[in-house]
Image: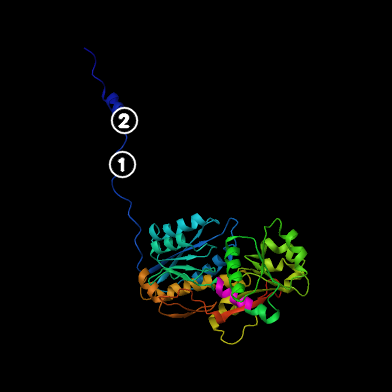
Amino acid sequence: MGRAPSTRALVALVLVLGACTTANPSATPTPAPTRDTNALNVTALLDLSGSRAPNGGPQRDALQLWADQHASVTPRVKLKIVDVASSPSKTALEIRRAAIEDRADAIVVGVSVDYNDALSAAVQLAHVPVLFTLPIPEPATSDGGWAFALAPTPAQLALSVLNDAALRSVLSSDLVVSDESITAIVERIALTRELARRQVKTEVMTVTAADAAQKLRPVLGTTPIVFLAGTPRSYLEAARTATVGTTLYLSYLSDLGDIADLRDAAALAVWPGSRWIASSSSGGGTAPRAAFVQAYTDRTGPPTSVAASAYDALGLLWNAGEKSIDPARVRDQLQSVTFTGVATTYAFSRSRHAGFNTSDIALLRYVAPRTLPALR
């Protein structure tokens, strides 16, 4: 008869068997995050990396400035900034993630988008207010739509630019240039539609950053009005060869750094924007507008119109959520009140979700680096 195993051997055997046995998975579901009834959760989607323009840095600075200035308001605004890295698919994915997983009460989209049926459907499914700070077409799909356009629409910008151009030259031999980026395509379509409505036949030239200089140089000296669609980066080298007598109409999305890179040709450039970020603005200005321009300039340099809209996005949402942060009630409030922001005075309705006051669109001109633009 063999010896009975020692107590120490039994303990060792139990430990080995235990180590080889797969533990049963827990059946307890991970709890979904609960809403803080005293906080308005806002997710902002920006392009902070990647190739899509414009870069979201100025909007991030404006959003953070608002958050810092209003840290003690009620309800509190809890801001989350997400880099979508110039990816259209990630933009749509993050809208869904923000609404479902993060349980955001509202979303700010500060990236270039093709506002098509698919994106519109994604916004509707999110079921929270989604504020776009870059130009998109009128986003009201039907009564109860969730998308709101804070910037002027492409059609409104085209009308403003062409009204200005018509005052200075006969619209007959003009040139629309597009690098066919997302923003350029949207602007090109709006410009050509408005020109066609005026029965003006216009040449459209498509370029890339690599061939823009070769294509544009021969025509810049003989074309009095040139519309450069999308952010100016692709056109900088060629546009520097423009001479007196040519007017370069740039995008609403232009920033002072790009315009400064035009060097001497910067004096020939104008672009549409909010009149309230111009150094010579007069009449109708408010203390909050002046305070924003000063605070933003002190922190990072002169603001763009897009940065001003990003700042206004949080102000609009906080104002609409002051009584209730329920997304449906926030949406209803957005549709029923007029809000004076720093870029414009916004007015939405159930059938109109593009709220920028077009009387606040002005043509701006370059003055100097780190200096506010001036009204044309």
Q: Is residue 72 visible?
A: no
Viewer-proximal residue, 330 or 27? 330
Q: Residue at horizontal 63%, vertical 65%?
A: 231
| Location of residue 85 in the rendering, given as x and y in whole percent from the top left corner | 55, 56
Q: Which quadrant: the C terminus? A: bottom right
Q: Image quarter for residue 10?
A: top left
Secondary structure beneath label 1:
loop
Residue type pointed to by label 2: Leu
Q: Nearer the viewer, residue 29 or 364?
A: 364
Q: How is the image coloured?
A: rainbow
User: What amino acid is labelled 1 in the image?
Assistant: Pro
Location of residue 219 with respect to 28 vertically, above or below: below
The residue identified by callout 1 is 25
Give the residue displayed 30% in from the left and 44% down from the top: 26
Residue 204 placed where, x, y %? 66, 65
In three-dimensional space, the C-alpha distance between marks 2 and 1, rounded to whole angstroms, equals: 20 Å
Quadrant in which residue 193 is drawn: bottom right
> Could you tell me how many numbered marks the image carries?
2
Q: Position of residue 111 (x, y in %)?
A: 54, 63
Viewer-closest of 334 and 66: 334
Q: Is residue 79 left or right of residue 308?
A: left
Q: Is residue 269 visible?
A: yes
Q: Which residue is mark 2?
A: 15
Magenta: main secondary structure: helix
Q: Of all residues shown, which one is farthest toward the top?
A: 1
- Of labels 2 and 1, earlier in sequence is 2
Crowding near the residue tagged with mark 2, few <14, some 14–19, many ≥20 C-alpha atoms within 10 Å: few
- Crowding around mark 1 (Cα neighbors within 10 Å: few <14, some 14 to 19, many 20+) is few
- Residue 164 in magenta stretch: no
Question: What secondary structure is marked by label 2?
Answer: helix
Range drawn in magenta: 154-162
